Image (cartoon, rainbow, N blue to C red):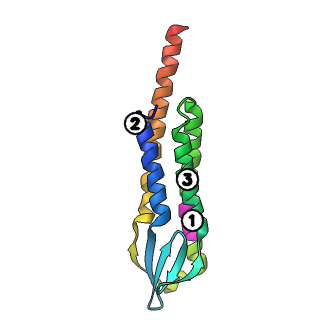
């Protein structure tokens, strides 16, 4: 069933979370120093100051879960449940991002310089997952209606 549109949505969601895991999330100015926030660490003037490998792990798990869900096309209800769980993980990506940012640097001395593409990708992945859930649900409704006609 890799030719279904929900398979494309899940594949794109996996790619979006992978991009979020490896690309810069944001750039800040902290006490006139440039801070680059990535999923693998926080870099102050180009040197690694804090490791944030948890963000990378969350993004990688979400990407992997989308790929696993993609191949469970015979069990549509499990696909829907795993997709909902994956959306919770994607929201957790943002919550952990905010937690790490608040824990490492005081907010009053922090100025946003630019937002990276890595911050936008989980939102795109959530939207794609919602679209996939809707299409999977439509397929399940179609199969159930055909089973009613047969039986």
| Quadrant housing residue 26 | bottom left
Q: What is the spatial separation of the Cα atoms under label 3 and label 2, in whole angstroms?
A: 20 Å
- Front position in the image: 127 or 56: 56
How far across and how far down the image is residue 79, in percent?
56, 37
| Quadrant housing residue 81 | top right
Circle 1 Cα neighbour tier, 10 Å, few/some/many (<14 / 14–19 / ≥20): many
How far across and how far down the image is residue 7, in percent?
44, 39
Q: Is mark 2 on a helix, strand or loop?
A: helix
Residue highlighted by disc 3: 62
The circle drawn on residue 5 is 2
- Front position in the image: 141 or 61: 61
Q: Earlier in the sequence, mark 3 or mark 2?
A: 2
Circle 2 Cα neighbour tier, 10 Å, few/some/many (<14 / 14–19 / ≥20): some
Q: Residue at position x 42%, y 48% from top?
A: 12
Q: Give the range drawn in magenta.
A: 93-99
Up-down: is 91 above or below 41? Answer: above
Residue highlighted by disc 1: 55
């Amino acid at each position: 069933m890799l030719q279904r549109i929900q398979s494309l949505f899940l594949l794109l969601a996996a790619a979006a979370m992978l991009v979020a895991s490896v690309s810069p999330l944001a750039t800040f100015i902290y006490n006139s120093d440039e801070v680059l926030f990535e999923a693998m660490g926080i870099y102050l003037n180009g040197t690694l100051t804090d490791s944030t490998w948890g963000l990378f792990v969350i993004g990688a798990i979400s990407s992997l879960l989308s790929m696993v869900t993609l191949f469970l096309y015979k069990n549509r209800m499990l696909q829907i449940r795993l997709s909902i769980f994956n959306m919770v993980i994607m929201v957790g990506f943002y919550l952990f991002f905010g937690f790490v940012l608040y824990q490492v640097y005081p907010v009053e001395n922090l100025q946003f310089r630019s937002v990276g593409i890595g911050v936008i990708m989980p939102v795109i992945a959530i939207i794609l997952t919602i679209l996939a859930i809707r299409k999977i649900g439509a397929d399940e409704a179609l199969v159930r209606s055909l089973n009613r006609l047969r039986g």
